[in-house]
Image (cartoon, rainbow, N blue to C red):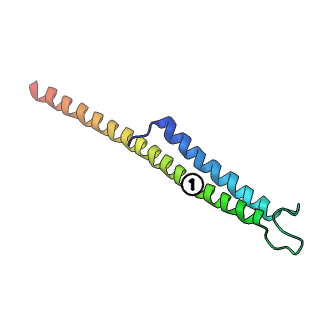
Amino acid sequence: MKLSRPVSWFLLAFGVWSWFIWITFVKNLWKDGSGLAFDDAGDPTAYFWVHLLLAITSFLLGTVVGVIGLRGVRALRREGRDGRDARAEADRDIRDIRDNRD
């Protein structure tokens, strides 16, 4: 499957955004002082575990999406470079043909 340039960049940006958002979320969850994440004894509550699982899952899915985007961007760059190399080689072939005709 070939991804377009905008889709590849969007997926890559989404992956980077996921890293930023979910790492920040877990840091804030860990520092929660409202009593939702930790009970009075300082032990994690069900709220903490559910949200930690949500964050880890979202982080992993964001990472996978970002990697797909990165691979798409790299493939497009490689394709562009190969296309320029092929055009340069074709130009050399045309020049050789012209030189041999004269």
Q: Depth check: give the residue in front, 25 or 91.
A: 25
Q: Residue furthest left?
A: 101
Residue 37 horizontal/vertical position (percent): 81, 64
Residue beneath the point at 59% across and 44% down:
13
Q: Residue furthest front?
A: 46
Horizontal side of 92 relative to 40 (left or right) equals left
Residue 36 horizontal/vertical position (percent): 84, 62
The quarter of the displayed image where residue 32 is located: bottom right
Q: Secondary structure at mark 1?
A: helix
Residue beneath the point at 86% across and 69% down:
39
The quarter of the displayed image where residue 50 is located: bottom right
Residue beneath the point at 69% across and 58% down:
23
Q: Residues within 10 Å of mark 1 (few under 14, many from 20)?
A: some
Asked if 100 appears above or below 19 in the picture, the reply is above
Residue beneath the point at 64% across and 54% down:
19
Quarter that holds the N terminus: top left
Q: Which residue is mark 1?
A: 61
Horizontal side of 22 relative to 42 (left or right) equals left
The quarter of the displayed image where residue 53 is located: bottom right
Q: Depth check: give the residue in front, 70 or 79.
A: 70
**Amino acid on which disc 1 is placed:** Leu
Asked if 90 appears above or below 41 in the picture, the reply is above
Residue 95 horizontal/vertical position (percent): 20, 29
